[in-house]
Amino acid sequence: MTTAKDLFIIALHLGSPDRPVGQGDLSLALAGAELVDLVTAGAVSLDGDRIVPDRGPTADDRLLAEAAAALEGQTPYERVEDWLWRRGRDLADSYQAALEEDGELRPGRRGLFPSGADRVEPADTPSRRHALDRWEGGEPVLVALASAAGVPGSRPGDAPGSGDEAVTTVLLAVGDAVMELEAVRQRRAIENAAFANVWRGP
């Protein structure tokens, strides 16, 4: 299992209709999780905040291999933040579909996202137990990504806790991207409220 799949399972396991995980937030965190795994595997390195593809081992996981294939292979290399936004588009949907196909999810009573129609939950599999072991053990990267995505039970503002400078750079970029997404949401809400007031009149 990859960090991204572990993160998705944890988000689904701990999420609830009362405290759903935002699909956009999770998608950004999933893109960050993929990049962390690629860095750890030696498939990429960072030059500052630029992602430099290396001739590392090929990823066994299909989605992680797709992520590696999507990297910009020529200079100027892509910035981490730009990667998160590009790769993260609808990425949570891709992970849900992949995990359902692999039998890791089953129909459930709760949905992951506020607007999600499909209600699924993690199946009782070794992958679920592995993800929970990482979570309950306080694995720093998984905890930091879950915190950035707003997974219930995580502590907002948790430090990345990684001794790897490249991994820390990715985790901080995920946090910044999620905050930027929230700022966009708030701005749109204010604009929509102002527009509604204009039509409502005095």
Image (cartoon, rainbow, N blue to C red):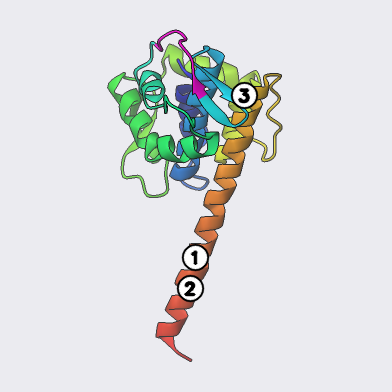
Q: Is residue 13 visible?
A: no
Q: Residues within 10 Å of mark 1 (few under 14, many from 20)?
A: few
125 lies above or below 154: above
Residue where numbered disc 3 is placed: 167
User: Which residue of the protein is positioned furthest toward the front in this rendering?
Assistant: 75
Residue type indicated by callout 1: Ala
Which is in the foreground here, disc 3 or disc 2?
3
Q: Is residue 82 visible?
A: yes
Q: Residue at x 53, y 63 (%)?
A: 187
User: Which residue of the protein is positioned furthest toward the bottom in this rendering?
Assistant: 202
Q: Residues within 10 Å of mark 2 (few under 14, many from 20)?
A: few
Residue 193 has which mark?
2
Dots 1, 3 in contact, CB < 8 A: no
Residue type indicated by callout 3: Val
Where is residue 49 drawn, in percent x and y? 59, 32
Part of the protein shown in magenta? 52-59
Dots 2, 1 in contact, CB < 8 A: yes
Element at label 2:
helix
